[in-house]
Image: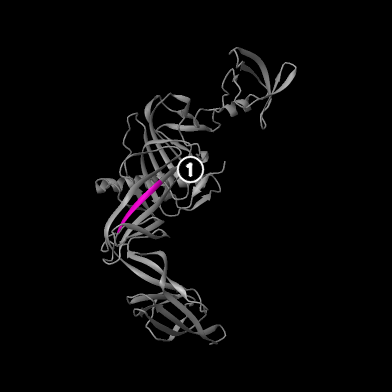
Amino acid sequence: MNRYGIGLAVALALSGQALGASTDGQRLALTIYNRDLALVQDVRSLDFTAGRSRLEFKDVSASIRPETVTLAATGVDIVEQNFDFDLLTPEKMMEKAVGRQVQIVRTNPGNGTEVTETATVLSVNNGVVLKIGDRIEVLRADGAPTRVIFDKVPENLRARPTLSINVQSNAAGRRDATLSYLTTGLSWKADYVAMFDEPANKLDMQGWVTLTNKSGTTFNDAVTQLIAGEINIVRAADDWQYQQYLQQQQYMQQQQRALAAQRGGNEPGARRPLADYYVYPLPERTTVADNQTKQVGFIDAHGVAARKVYEYYADWFTTLNDPAHAAVVVRFANSTRGGLGAQLPAGMVRVYVRDTDGKPRFVGENRIEHVPQGSEISVKTGEAFDVTVQPTLVKQDRAGFWRSRYSMEYLVRNARSQATTLEIRQGGLWREGKVLEESIKSTRPDAYTLQWSVPVAANGETKLTFTVETGW
């Protein structure tokens, strides 16, 4: 059997948050990842008989990865496991009845008299074909008063997805058993609402987690936590690799529990590091129903230092025949000093401002990637109507066999009644690129980019000129 391994198995470990017992003794925990994947840990108190016995779990996920199932209990070994996901439906009952006899009950609409006949099901392809006596008949599906009676339910049809496990126990008695598995059908995403106060250079930000459950199963009263980060999923070459993953998972669980004990518990809603990812525990148990989308708040920050910035980015040295509009960007620092200071999972940021009547108005949205603490966040909300920039490649020369020299001119116009500053970012430099001359002093945010802050007077224009030499 092929097993699914996890490139960084520690990402699957549960945090140190304890699984408190629910009213029926079942303890359930969900760890949900960004990539339509979740780890389910289901702790139950079960009665084991000595020797071999069969356990059935009727409320596991319908999207379970059976090859990732593990059952851990003291003195218990797994002999065999099966996952029956053929669900009991009228269509499935008819499919399983092909070649067998059923009873067809027809009701006379006029007098209500019922007539029962024995029929053999011949086919259920695009309709049900029956043999009744010497005639072949198609079972109508137009709502006619007809019923089909079956003598039994086929053994492999289940009312709910069912995982059955044959185990060997060295002794009889009641003990805890932990069922763990990976499943698809569970996912989450983050969304942010930012109210930007431009005159005050502040914003208020709320963050919402949206949980979506399409796994085919409801998870009741579960300790739920979310993992921010992109885990690597690979198909393991053999069972040895899968066993290594399980051992690493168990080790990380022990380490997380020990860490939680040292800290005296975990603050509800706190973000905690887990390897190269961040864990976002929901503050209290939650029920994630099948086919449900649920929203939970996880950030509520006020007075975050922010500012509006006009930006223009060029990825190469080129000329535009027509002026381009500058991008309008709301920029703020993800720092404690700035009023935020939390690891932010990737998501959509929607920005609002208040109009002259004080009513919030939507001004734009953009997606951010996973943002570590201390990073700067830029959210492009749109393009400026009255701030434009027109680049011109004035001259291009060869400066060597593998090197070139570029002379550029950027004409920035500001039709606003207030002075402004445009940030121009010029890409296209190699690591050996250098500035030969420039009209405004540049900075270098990375090895391949130059940046200038170009001030422009109200209803005025400014020309930025520079010459660079680049190559390898």
Q: How is the image coloured?
A: one colour
State whether the magenta stretch is mostly helix, strand or loop.
Answer: strand
Residue 83: x, y in percent?
Answer: 53, 33
- Work out which residue is located at the far left of the displayed protein and give it: 264
Task: Determine the residue positioned at 37% across, 49% down.
Answer: 209
Determine whether 196 is above or below 162 in the image.
Answer: below
Name the quarter where the N terminus is drawn. top right
Q: Which of these two is toward me, 213 or 47?
A: 213
Task: Determine the residue positioned at 35% across, 28% down.
Answer: 24
Instruction: Give the residue type at disc 1.
Output: Gly
Residue 202 position by quadrant: bottom left
Tell me, yes or no, if residue 346 can be seen here: no
Residue 25 position by quadrant: top left
Segment tinted magenta in the rendering: 204-210
Left or right: residue 333 compared with residue 324: left
Tell me, yes or no, if residue 332 can be seen here: yes
Q: Secondary structure at mark 1?
A: loop
| Label 1 packing within 10 angstroms: few (<14), some (14-19), many (20+) | many
Residue 36: x, y in percent?
Answer: 47, 47
Return the residue at label 1: 185
Task: Determine the residue positioned at 32% across, 57% down.
Answer: 360
Left or right: residue 90 compared with residue 337: right
Residue 123: x, y in percent?
Answer: 69, 27
Task: Determine the residue positioned at 44% across, 46% down.
Answer: 187
Q: Which of these two is toward me, 79 or 14?
A: 14
Q: Which of these two is toward me, 319 or 224?
A: 319
Left or right: residue 214 compared with residue 120: left
